[in-house]
Image (cartoon, rainbow, N blue to C red):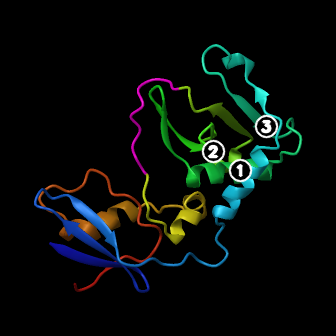
């Protein structure tokens, strides 16, 4: 079964429902982000890879026996500002991938040579004041993180770390999306409906 909904303009997502009632999303085109949206691109990634190699990383003595790593922090590491830390955190969360630290799932960015991985700890990226670094030969707990690797790139990758803060979800958005998608799934609806950005969602004829 196929059902189409319009996200914005000419952007269309095809919802395919399999015999088990599971929904598969197949974007047929992408909407270009609004002009002025903060974006993180590969030029930002290059900036961080170059900067990280020039910084004076501090060894975290508190974790020397349990989880050896280093860090840079605004206000103490020379050449590091709050703007740098926020930008670095957005780079890590844009180009990184999930990894496990015991029961916790974190986003790690691995260096091109595979020697280091970087991560942050703040709940909100704009609060980032510190970036951690460790070698990739150390693991903690069972490594079974979800895989988010894909060869697909979209304009939304560049604004993924700023979108929710710039466009807060409304109280009725989740319910409205569920109602619009009700006819696209089978007997058993999906357990979770991911956010479809903040675009007008309307039903159109297939």
Q: Which residue is identified by label 2?
A: 111
Task: Give the image quarter of residue 69.
Answer: top right
Identify which residue, 81 or 136, lies in the foreground. 136
| Circles 1 and 3 in contact, beta carbons < 8 Å | no
Q: Residues within 10 Å of mark 1 (few under 14, many from 20)?
A: some
Q: Which residue is depicted at the point 43% across and 52% down?
A: 149
Give the mark, 3 or 2, whose residue is nearer the N terminus: 3
Residue 40 in view of the camera:
no
Residue 49 badge: 1
Name the outermost residue toward the front.
113
Name the outermost residue toward the right.
78
x then y, percent, for residue 90: 64, 53
x then y, percent, for residue 109: 59, 45
Name the outermost residue toward the top.
65
Segment colored magenta: 139-148
78 relative position to 48: left or right = right
Q: Which residue is identified by label 3?
A: 73
> Closer to the camera: disc 1 or disc 3?
1
Label 1: element kind: helix
Chief secondary structure of the magenta span? loop
Give the mark, 1 or 2, whose residue is nearer the N terminus: 1
| Circles 1 and 2 in contact, beta carbons < 8 Å | yes
> Closer to the camera: disc 3 or disc 2?
2
Magenta-colored stretch includes residue 99: no
Task: Give the image quarter of residue 38.
Answer: bottom right
Q: Which residue is depicted at the point 89% across and 40% down?
A: 78
Where is 100 relative to 66, above or below?
below
Where is 200 relative to 184, above or below?
below
x then y, percent, for residue 206: 22, 84
């Amino acid at each position: 079964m196929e059902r189409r909904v319009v996200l914005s303009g000419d952007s269309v997502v095809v919802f395919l429902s399999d015999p088990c009632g599971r929904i598969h999303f197949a974007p047929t085109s992408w909407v270009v982000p609004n002009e002025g949206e903060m974006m993180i691109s590969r030029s930002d990634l290059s900036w961080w890879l170059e900067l990280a190699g020039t910084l004076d990383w501090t060894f975290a003595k508190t974790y020397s026996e349990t989880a050896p790593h280093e860090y840079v922090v605004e206000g103490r590491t020379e050449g590091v500002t709050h703007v740098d830390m926020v930008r670095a955190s957005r780079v890590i969360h844009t180009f990184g991938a999930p990894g496990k630290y015991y029961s916790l799932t974190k986003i790690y960015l691995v260096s091109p040579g595979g020697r280091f991985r970087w991560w942050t700890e703040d709940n909100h990226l704009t609060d980032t004041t510190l970036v951690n670094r460790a070698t990739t030969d150390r693991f903690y707990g069972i490594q079974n993180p979800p895989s988010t690797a894909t060869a697909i790139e979209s304009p939304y990758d560049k604004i993924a770390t700023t979108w929710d803060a710039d466009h807060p979800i409304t109280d009725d958005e989740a319910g409205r999306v569920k109602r619009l998608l009700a006819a696209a799934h089978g007997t058993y609806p999906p357990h979770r409906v991911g956010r479809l950005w903040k675009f007008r969602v309307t039903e159109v004829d297939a």
